[in-house]
Image: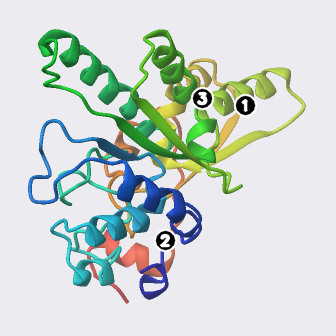
Amino acid sequence: MVQKANSGHPGLPMGAAPMAYVLWSRFLRFNPQDPHWQNRDRFILSAGHGSALLYSLLHLYGYDLPLAELQNFRQLGSKTPGHPESFLTPGIEVTTGPLGQGFGNGVGVAIAEAFLAAKYNRPDFPLIDHYTYALVSDGDLMEGLTAEAASLAGHLKLGKLIFLYDHSNIWFGVREHGMGSILNGMASHRGVRAYGGTFLTFSDYMRGAIRLAALTEAPVTYVFTHDSIAVGEDGPTHQPVEHITATVFKLYRLFNSRMSCIMSGRGPV
């Protein structure tokens, strides 16, 4: 899939395949003919860049995702986009989007299960009784929101929430909120030029720090990539269309000749 598309991440799908196979073949309860069966176990791929693994599992276990869709991985109009989208592909529980979101989503799903079980279950009649599994990566665990969500999960004693950890050494996480605060501190010390970079969509994780930099006119430079111009194979969860209009700083956008033609309406050269 990844090789044919010439795009995507092969490491996680290959590295996590053994544990994913064991989970899906021996433990996970689901019904491909009824993807929304209420008491199904939930599987959440927080590490969405490894979507090829999840698409392969859905195909192999009988969901409405034919081989042709796998062969059309990361292509326009396919049901196998660069990152999983619940409104597009049957069997996808949640659109996890940026790193760390899936971890928090998993905690939320487990909270909902525990609440409904406490409200509706009766002795000898467990109406709501399912597990929540989530596959997370190094990058997920680096994001600050993961620690916040994990703390709440522990406090609530969510014993039916299980995370699988893919230790791949592919450090995608950037700790954006911390990075933004660190840049402000460097700028306030003076004597250095502070700059940091990440995907534009991850600027949401550091918006508080960005706003403070704007308020104090701190000389901080942000290098944001993967913006909304000529949106590519990472898809709308990772290449937003609205962020540039919501900026609070001076914006400089580099263009090559092809992008300039597209933006001016003359079409590609």
Between marks 1 and 2 in the image, the one whose residue lies nearer the viewer: 2
Q: Amino acid at mark 2?
A: Gly
Q: CA distance from mark 2 to mark 3?
A: 26 Å
Q: Is residue 106 left or right of residue 167?
A: left
Label 2 crowd bin: few (<14), some (14–19), many (20+), radius 10 Å: many
Q: Earlier in the sequence, mark 2 or mark 3?
A: 2
Q: Which residue position holds label 2?
A: 8
Q: Residue at x 67, y 24 (%)?
A: 181
Callout 1–callout 2 Cβ contact below 8 Å? no
Q: Which quadrant of the figure has residue 194?
A: top right
Q: Which residue position holds label 1?
A: 183
Q: CA distance from mark 1 to mark 2?
A: 31 Å
Q: Residue at x 47, y 79 (%)?
A: 2
Residue 71 in view in this figure: yes
Q: Earlier in the sequence, mark 3 or mark 1?
A: 3
Label ID, residue 239:
none
Q: Which residue position holds label 3?
A: 177
Q: Residue at x 58, y 34 (%)?
A: 143
Q: Is residue 184 left or right of residue 156?
A: right
- What percent of the width, then of the height, locates residue 255? 50, 69
- What percent of the width, then of the height, locates residue 8? 49, 71
- What percent of the width, then of the height, locates residue 154? 51, 16
Q: Residue at x 20, y 78 (%)?
A: 66
Regarding mark 1 in the picture, which secondary structure is present there? helix
Between marks 2 and 3 in the image, the one whose residue lies nearer the viewer: 2
Q: Amino acid at mark 1?
A: Leu
Q: Amino acid at mark 3?
A: His
Indicate the quadrant containing the N terminus: top left, top right, bottom left or bottom right.
bottom left
Residue 234 in view in this figure: no
